[in-house]
């Protein structure tokens, strides 16, 4: 499954999103022995995302997170088949994978390198395994999303057994462990144990300054339904909710319910829903919930065909065939950062790399881009050129070159100029030969 999805990725023009470039730039800084700079871009540093970028660093920078996400999607398919087979038989496993493979935006997750696929893989993977492996999956997921903290605490309490006090202590310990690891990472990398929290606060402040107004709590459920339906398709959403509900009810009556499944569905829906009241929430946050709805479709099909005999090997072959068919029919995503922009930045790198020999490069902000501006290019330029983010900036002095991105306002210094696909470089003649 991973080979199929990675092959599909390599056919497409790379176009990682700004978050993926940030993780890659931070990972490369750490590998060079530098401390990464977190506060220049509206992206929250996630320890596991940075670690994955470091592990995948031998891959071309423009493909790093695309490959990570392709492997994560394959892991989701594997885990869905495993859980579906165990809970509802071969048909449930095949339908779970098929429903997931038919989600409408998987192509965008791969091309833009969206780390939420890793969160979903760890969540569904936790359902597929037991014991310490389950806790490990949820703790790792907690290094990407705080929703997993609740689930790791719940599973830790259940697995601890013994007295009520023992379970409460274990639940608190396992719930706080990923948060503590996240904080420790922030402390090591930035001397601030709450760096990620402070960065999230700055991002929310930027949203408010840009005109975001919190919706009423009464409107949030409708927004959640709309986003989930967009991410899954109405049929998968309806069948998934029905399947998860029926499965939970029947297994609870039989005393064989895995409590993680309904808890995960509730927590990973409520978490992004609560965030909607604080700032804009992209639909990708709901990918873990979408994967669970795909599982719900499989469990519903398993209930409908209960008693049907089929070999697991036949089911595995059918699931792989569904995944291959889905990958083969995927189109290049029409939204998000364009392939043309990604190609333009790539073609501009040689000139910018030469300009860095003259000193730091100032990246001017496009007109009207008060929140991100030229900073959206900094991570990508740093990762592609292999230089520190500190070699770039949008304000200050003592620059050896200035890059005016197309659409930027303001004059360039009266220096010699070089045209690049993303804008014009002005080079300090006293520093540049």
Image (cartoon, rainbow, N blue to C red):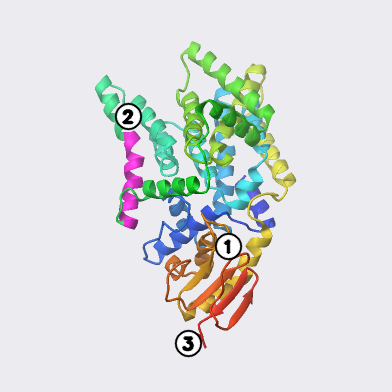
Compared with residue 252, is residue 338 higher up or lower down, i.e. above or below? below
Q: Which residue is drawn at 61% across and 25% down?
A: 240
Q: Earlier in the sequence, mark 3 or mark 1?
A: 1
Foreground of the two, 433 or 171: 433
Determine whether, in the image, residue 35 is placed left or right of residue 90. Answer: left
Q: Write down the residue under mark 2.
A: 171
Q: Please indicate, yes or no, whether residue 331 appears anywhere in the rendered image.
A: yes
What x and y, as percent, mark residue 429? Answer: 51, 86
Please identify the quarter of the rendering in which residue 94 is found: top right
Q: Earlier in the sequence, mark 2 or mark 1?
A: 2
What x and y, as percent, mark residue 81? Answer: 59, 33
What x and y, as percent, mark residue 205? Answer: 44, 47
Q: Write down the residue under mark 3.
A: 430
How many residues crowd mark 3 within 10 Å: few (<14), some (14–19), many (20+)? few
How many residues crowd mark 1 within 10 Å: few (<14), some (14–19), many (20+)? some
Mark 3 vs mark 2: in front: 3
Q: Please indicate, yes or no, whether residue 131 appears anywhere in the rendered image.
A: no
Report how far apart the C-alphas of labels 3 and 1 lie in the structure. 27 Å
Judge whether residue 185 is colored magenta.
yes
Write down the region rendered in magenta.
174-190
Report how far apart the C-alphas of labels 3 and 2 lie in the structure. 62 Å
Q: Which residue is drawn at 51% across and 32% down?
A: 273
Element at label 3: loop
Give the main secondary structure, helix, strand or loop, of the magenta stretch. Answer: helix
Judge whether residue 167 is colored magenta.
no
Element at label 1: loop
Q: Write down the residue under mark 1.
A: 366
Quadrant of the image for the N terminus? top right
Please identify the quarter of the rendering in which residue 152 is found: top left
Mark 3 vs mark 1: in front: 1
Foreground of the two, 191 or 118: 191
Element at label 2: helix
């Amino acid at each position: 499954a991973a080979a199929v999805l990675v092959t599909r990725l390599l056919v497409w023009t790379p176009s990682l999103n700004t978050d993926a470039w940030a993780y890659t730039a931070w990972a490369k800084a750490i590998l060079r022995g530098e401390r990464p700079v977190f506060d220049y871009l509206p992206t929250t540093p996630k320890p596991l995302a940075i670690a994955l970028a470091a592990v995948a660093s031998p891959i071309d920078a423009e493909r790093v997170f695309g490959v990570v996400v392709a492997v994560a999607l394959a892991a989701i398919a594997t885990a869905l088949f495993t859980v579906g087979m165990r809970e509802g038989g071969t048909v449930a496993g095949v339908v779970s994978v098929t429903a997931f493979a038919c989600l409408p935006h998987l192509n965008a997750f791969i091309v833009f390198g969206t780390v939420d696929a890793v969160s979903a893989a760890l969540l569904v993977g936790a359902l597929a395994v037991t014991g310490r492996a389950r806790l490990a999956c949820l703790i790792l997921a907690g290094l990407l999303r705080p929703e997993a903290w609740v689930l790791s605490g719940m599973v830790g309490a259940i697995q601890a057994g013994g007295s009520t006090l023992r379970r409460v202590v274990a639940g608190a310990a396992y719930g706080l462990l990923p948060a503590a690891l996240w904080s420790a990472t922030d402390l090591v990398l930035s001397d601030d144990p709450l760096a990620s929290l402070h960065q999230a606060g700055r991002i929310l402040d930027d949203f408010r300054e840009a005109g975001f107004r919190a919706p009423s709590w009464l409107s949030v459920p409708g927004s959640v339904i709309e986003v989930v339906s967009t991410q899954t398709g109405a049929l998968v959403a309806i069948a998934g909710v029905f399947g998860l509900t029926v499965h939970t009810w029947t297994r609870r009556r039989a005393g064989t319910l895995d409590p993680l499944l309904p808890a995960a569905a509730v927590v990973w829906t409520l978490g992004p829903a609560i965030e909607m009241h604080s700032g804009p929430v992209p639909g990708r946050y709901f990918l873990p919930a979408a994967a669970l709805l795909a599982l719900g479709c499989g469990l519903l099909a398993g209930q409908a065909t209960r008693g049907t005999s089929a070999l697991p090997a036949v089911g595995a072959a059918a699931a792989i065939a569904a995944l291959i068919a889905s990958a083969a029919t995927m189109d290049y995503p029409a939204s998000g950062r364009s392939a043309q922009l990604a190609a333009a930045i790539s073609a501009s790198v040689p000139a910018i790399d030469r300009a860095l020999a003259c000193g730091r490069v100032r990246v001017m902000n496009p007109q009207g881009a008060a929140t991100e501006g030229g900073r959206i290019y900094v991570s990508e330029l740093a990762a592609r050129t292999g230089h520190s983010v500190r070699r770039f900036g949008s304000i200050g002095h003592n620059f050896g070159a200035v890059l005016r991105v197309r659409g930027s306002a303001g004059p360039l210094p009266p220096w010699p100029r070089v045209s690049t696909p993303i804008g014009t470089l002005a080079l300090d003649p006293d520093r540049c030969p």
